Amino acid sequence: MTERAADVVVVGGGLMGAATAFFLRRRGRSVILLERGLIGQQASGVNFGNVRRQGRFPPQLPLANRSRDIWGRLPELLGEDAEFLPSGHVRVCFRREEVGELEAHARDALPYGLELELLSGNMLRARFPYLGPAAVAGSFSPLDGHANPRLAAPAFGRAAARAGAVVCENTEVLAIEKAGDDFVIETRESGRFRAPVVQISAGAWGGALAERFGEKVPLVVRGPQMGVTEPMPYALEPVIGVYSAVPEEGVYLRQVKRGNIVYGGGLRGPAYPDLRRAYVDPANLLRQLPHIARVVPALRALRVIRSWSGIEGYIDDDIPVIGPSAKVAGLFYAFGFCGHGFQLGPGVGDVMAELIATGRTSTPIEPFRIGRFAGTYACYENRGSSGNRVGGFGGS
Ligand SMILES: Cc1cc2nc3c(=O)[nH]c(=O)nc-3n(C[C@H](O)[C@H](O)[C@H](O)COP(=O)(O)OP(=O)(O)OC[C@H]3O[C@@H](n4cnc5c(N)ncnc54)[C@H](O)[C@@H]3O)c2cc1C
């Protein structure tokens, strides 16, 4: 049996794993990236494409800021831009009593360097004339935007390979054992690998791998639902999202330069990690459309041409696991991004490479430590039909 060795083996080639491999090579570490399917095939490739910082758990903003900086430098770093468009992000609410919550978030975000512009309903419509009368107020984040998820993770994977990473697609990790100072990683298709450091960045499947090391995480798997309309003339520059305590109302949309409106949000559908499938629930699709039209009434006239879902891991407290294992030296985690990992991906890759290479990070990641669940794990079902948390920071 063949055995290949490197400084680091990264398990999972979504945006987290591909970006980590890329940044590890920039720090001179040898790295092998193992992906069961194709790079960026799962959540990282099928998500909505929001590159949004507003609406996040405020202590996550330093990492989101680091990531935003990298999004702006993709051409210089990767030689391609993944269609990142820093066209702004506007978050609207439908109820007067929610205005105070948008204001509070703007206050909380400011110390972290995120400046949000608060707009009354009339100011919103003067600035973005396509918004309907239901929007009573909003906040605008001018430097956020959107990108093409189909392009981002593969671009990092290709750049990592060009920089010398060994990228193995169609390679499923079956077992990871610690043998002395090294980990031995068994795969079905490509033999055995050995490294003193392993990163588990296996998305919705990360919880099951962490559990094999005795680190249980309260993670459930869901399928956020997306759709795309026929094209119309390009008019909607910013990404638009609804802030609401009612899960069905929490929709979001963006227009790509080619004219189509991509939308998502509302209730999440069931996802089946063992089958690697998340199915669209047609009832959820029908629930999304009235709320989309409530935000931008002109969209009512458009035909939906495709809808889809993807498999995402949601952790009980709506924030991911990022950082070293609390139990096993040399083991690192970056998984369970609760519907908001696309924006964070480049920053997570950079920060994980820094952590692995230097033992510390210049961006705080302490809130995301896996040890926060020690002793609190109860019983979690691994799939379901809704699972949205009211008032949390998850979601696109
Ligand atoms: C429909 C949808 C819409 C979303 N919209 C947004 C958005 O607009 N903005 C935003 O910020 N976030 C969004 N998200 C969330 C975001 O897509 C994810 O948080 C992010 O892509 C997670 O990246 P990842 O690398 O952790 O996981 P993934 O992309 O799931 O990658 C994990 C990889 O690990 C591989 N893997 C698993 N087990 C093994 C194994 N044993 N061996 C080898 N490989 C393995 C899988 O095949 C997979 O490719 C959305 C998610 C979905 C599903």
Image (spheres, rainbow, N blue to C red):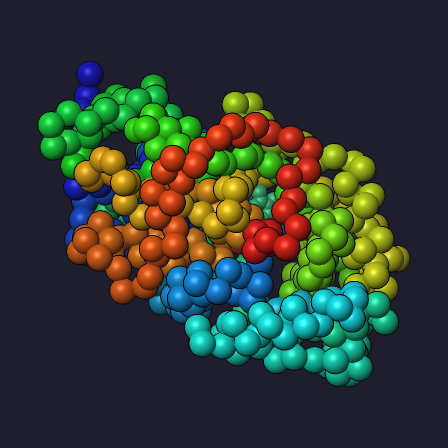
Q: Residue furthest right?
A: 301
Q: In the picture, which quadrant includes the N terminus? A: top left
Q: How many marks?
A: 0
Depth check: 76 or 315 in front?
315
Along the horizontal axis of the image, is 348 left or right of 328?
right
Q: Quadrant of residue 258?
A: bottom right
The structure residue drawn at horizontal position 59% and vertical position 53%, both measured from the top left corner, is: 392
**Residue at the image position 65 percent from the left and 70 percent from the top:** 102
Choose between 26 and 357: the one closer to the eye: 357
Where is residue 14? Give x, y as percent.
43, 43
The residue located at (53%, 61%) in the rendering is 56
Give how far across and how far down residue 174 sits, in percent.
34, 21
* Residue projecting furthest to the front: 375
- Is any part of residue 358 visible from this angle? yes
In the rendered image, residue 252, in percent from the top left (x then y), is placed at: 69, 57
Which is more toward the observer, 197 or 102? 102
Q: Foreground residue, 256 or 15?
A: 15
Q: Is residue 206 above or below residue 295?
A: above
Describe residue 82's horizontal placement relative to residue 75 as left or right: right
- Judge left or right: residue 186 versus residue 299: left
In the displayed structure, would residue 60 be above or below residue 276? below
Residue at 72% in and 49% down: 247
| Image quarter (top left, top right, bottom left or bottom right) of the C terminus | bottom right
